[in-house]
């Protein structure tokens, strides 16, 4: 299922739905920052939508779950690390209308975790200096977050 | 119904629910900024929870509504102004566990609107210089957004 990004739609309507009713998908994401100020990117695997693109680790927030709980869970599942809620700092968010859903993605910064970052799902990982984040093709929703990270780090 | 703010709960659990399952409430809010760089605050009316506290205009995002559509709707209802989606710039978000729900509140900056800001619901309004935002008592969720606004403006 290809995902294309409608741009500039008035009143927040998504491309495929002129009445503007599209499912809202909430994804909590993390910018893990190492001691050298580099940010962790993970590559979407083959077979998934937008395969090959780079993104911030994280995942969907389940019903009646807090974004922090979801993110802590996803970081453990995807990267094998443990993170305290107090080490998740709200930074920015992305809000993006795709064809068949609208993504809302709060992004947290995390500089402290327990364990070693490991690709638990066979995904490609890379620690990237902020100035180089733009070299990595990302889904349209993630791209506006790059300038925010550059300013911070 | 008093709302108190649990702090520092591990794993994102809210005070009243050790398993961490609490309803997630999504509220879209706007920092309207006028030509002098002042930010609009609105006072919560008597009879509502946290009455008398100051907050950013906005409201709950309905099911399958985008945050932008919700905010555009609320700004029209509360303040009588029309805002284009392209004039809503994602800035930051608040994520806060209250006793019986968890609030996720994306905050957009808006500098351009059509019409004149008017208190359509009898609420007290005030245009506040960023340096003075801290003078206004706010719900615990809104407070961390003040430094972000000060840095921006």
Image: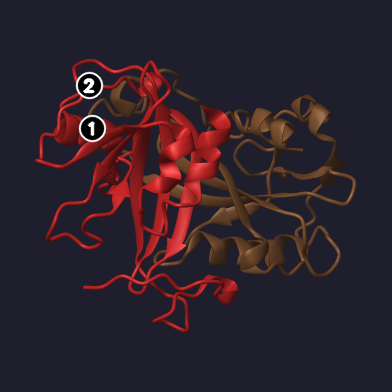
Chain colours: A brown, B red
Residue drawn at x 77%, y 65% as measured from the top left: A113
Cα distance between the residues tagged 2 and 1 = 7 Å
Q: Is residue B115 left or right of residue B89?
A: left
Q: Are marks 2 and 1 on the same chain?
A: yes
Residue A110 in the image, given as x and y percentages of width and height: 71, 55
Residue A18 in the image, given as x and y percentages of width and height: 26, 25
Residue drawn at x 60%, y 28% as measured from the top left: A144
Residue A100 bears which disc, if any?
A: none
| Label 1: which secondary element | helix
The residue at which mark 1 appears reads as: B75
Q: Is residue A120 left or right of residue B128?
A: right
Frontmost residue, B131 versus A64: B131
Residue drawn at x 88%, y 51% as measured from the top left: A35
Is residue B9 shown above or below B134?
A: below
Q: Are marks 2 and 1 in contact (CB under 8 Å)?
A: yes
Q: Chain of mark 2?
A: B
The residue at which mark 2 appears reads as: B82
| Residue B132 in view here | yes
Frontmost residue, A91 versus A57: A91
Q: Chain of mark 1?
A: B
Furthest toward the bottom, the residue is B18
| Residue A141 in view here | no
Instruction: Decide which of tag 2 and tag 1 comes sooner along the chain.
Output: 1
């Amino acid at each position: 299922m290809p995902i294309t990004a409608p741009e500039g739609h008035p009143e927040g309507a998504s491309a495929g739905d002129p009445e503007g009713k599209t499912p809202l998908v909430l994804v909590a994401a993390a910018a893990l920052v190492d001691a050298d100020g580099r940010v962790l990117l993970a590559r979407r695997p083959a077979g998934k939508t937008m395969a090959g693109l780079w993104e911030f680790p994280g995942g969907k927030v389940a019903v009646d779950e807090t974004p922090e709980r979801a993110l802590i869970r996803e970081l453990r599942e995807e990267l094998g690390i443990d993170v305290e809620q107090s080490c998740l700092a709200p930074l920015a968010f992305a809000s993006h209308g795709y064809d068949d859903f609208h993504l809302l993605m709060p992004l947290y910064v995390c500089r402290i975790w327990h364990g070693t970052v490991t690709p638990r799902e066979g995904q490609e990982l890379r620690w990237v200096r902020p100035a180089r984040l733009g070299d990595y093709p990302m889904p349209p929703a993630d791209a506006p977050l790059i300038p925010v990270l550059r300013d911070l780090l």
